[in-house]
DNA sequence: CTAGAAAATGACCGTTAGTCATTTTGATGA
DNA sequence: TCATCAAAATGACTAACGGTCATTTTCTAG
């Protein structure tokens, strides 16, 4: 009989329903200003029940971020084989991130916000984080693309790949975190997010070329 | 009679003493885990008194960060005139930041942590923040240096200066924020902070050259 | 010595993440 | 149909902490 199966399915549905409620609340009021009671009301459940599905507010937030990450990965995969050239693919990945930020601004913010906090990697259960890092994620894809670019000669090879990929990843995530954390500074200088990302990519397109390679067409 | 003067002096001393206590507590237990009661005990004052000098926990943290910023600025000013060449001075500024992180790791962390949060610029009194931004700070110095570099021909001029300076600032602060927030990721890839900063500067030294300028000596 | 202002105190408040004893639900077997 | 029992759900409660304010203490001035 499929009773255990049905129960499992119901549990999964409720789990997703809580994430739905969490999204609605967090995206509307912002993470810090949202309370678990808010989420409970939205989900039409008691707060106690939430804690049967999530061990903490941060874990719920993590689940939302994971959804966002899946969406982003989808957009990246789609662009991954547009070009066979490594450096151009890299640019596509950058554009995927921009596209993501326009299509799903809320998930984008959740992801950026989460990236800029040191909480989860320490306080969340090791297992969950390990699992997340082990899975194919934006950093993995970046790494593969760099390998391709180094192989086809479109990307410099004098920086070890592990260093280069983490650096590029940190740069991109970093400027986005800074932009969301320090909007006032950027406004003061009349620089928008689009401009920031653009000039970043512009700098990169030159920086990644193998030395002495002529004929840059950054644009 | 100098009574008002003495009072003012005493007030300033107490103000500084509270920052001292705040530093001791925050640097030891971490900002989030530290309570205002902890600080009060360390300062040998009641909690209520703290709030006569600081309107919030964040404002106390801001004051600590300002101290750090002053130290950093000192290190930067010192290196500012080592070279008359713009691009080399820019590198010196990067190295000043590295030096700062080694000399004053606690202030460095406070600064980074503060940079990566969106709280203060919104919740702190406008005046305080405006004042901070108006003062000569790392971003100002960066801007000046870029101007010099563009003038002496050592830095590309095709990116507007406001965009370029904010981008470079966001990149550098960004990767440091990411490093402190996501140490686990970097450890997994065996990349240390020194390596991260190095490969970042390496990429930059190529990216900032005027197009078609030959003979790169990045090192 | 006293009046009164300025500084300091600490008991108290409101909020909220997280807990747990109790209740409800629903499957099972007689 | 009902009794039993485990799983699920509940919501009152706790602990912790940032921030407040009526009261007390300290200091100045006349």
Image (cartoon, coloured by chain):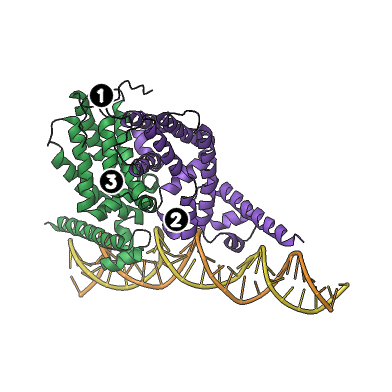
Chain colours: A purple, B green, C orange, D yellow
Specify which label sits upstream in the sequence, 1 or 3: 3
Is disc 1 in the same subunit as disc 3?
yes
Hey, which quadrant is residue D17 in on the image?
bottom left
Whether residue B131 is visible here, answered yes or no, is no
Q: Could you say where residue A25 lies in the image, as x and y percent from the top left?
A: 56, 49
**Left or right position of A216 against A61:** left
Between A37 and B201, the residue placed more toward the observer is: B201
Q: Residue at x 50, y 36 (%)?
A: A76
**Can you identify the residue that label 2 sits on?**
A120
Hey, which quadrant is residue B140 in on the image?
top left
Q: Chain of mark 3?
A: B
Between A107 and A144, the residue placed more toward the observer is: A144
**Can you identify the residue that label 1 sits on?**
B210
**Can you identify the residue that label 3 sits on?**
B195
Whether residue A173 is visible here, answered yes or no, is yes
Secondary structure at badge 3 equals: helix
Between B210 and A24, the residue placed more toward the observer is: B210
């Amino acid at each position: 009989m499929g009773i255990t199966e049905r129960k499992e399915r119901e549990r999964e549905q409720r789990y997703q329903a809580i994430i739905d409620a969490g999204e609605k609340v967090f995206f509307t009021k912002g993470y810090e200003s949202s309370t678990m009671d808010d989420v409970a009301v939205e989900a039409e459940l008691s707060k106690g029940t939430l804690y049967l599905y999530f061990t903490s507010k941060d874990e719920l937030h993590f689940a939302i971020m994971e959804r966002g990450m899946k969406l982003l990965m989808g957009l990246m995969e789609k662009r991954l084989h547009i070009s066979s050239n490594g450096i151009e693919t890299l640019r596509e990945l950058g554009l995927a991130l921009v596209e993501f930020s326009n299509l799903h601004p809320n998930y984008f913010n959740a992801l950026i916000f989460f990236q800029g906090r040191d909480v989860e990697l320490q306080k969340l259960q090791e297992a969950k984080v390990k699992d997340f890092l082990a899975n194919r994620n934006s950093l993995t894809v970046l790494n593969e693309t760099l390998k391709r670019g180094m192989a086809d000669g479109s990307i410099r090879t004098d920086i070890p790949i592990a260093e280069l990929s983490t650096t590029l990843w940190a740069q991109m995530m970093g400027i986005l975190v800074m932009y969301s954390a320090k909007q006032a500074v950027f406004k003061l200088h009349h620089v928008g997010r689009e401009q920031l990302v653009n000039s970043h990519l512009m700098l990169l397109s030159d920086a990644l070329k193998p030395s002495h390679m002529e004929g840059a067409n950054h644009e």
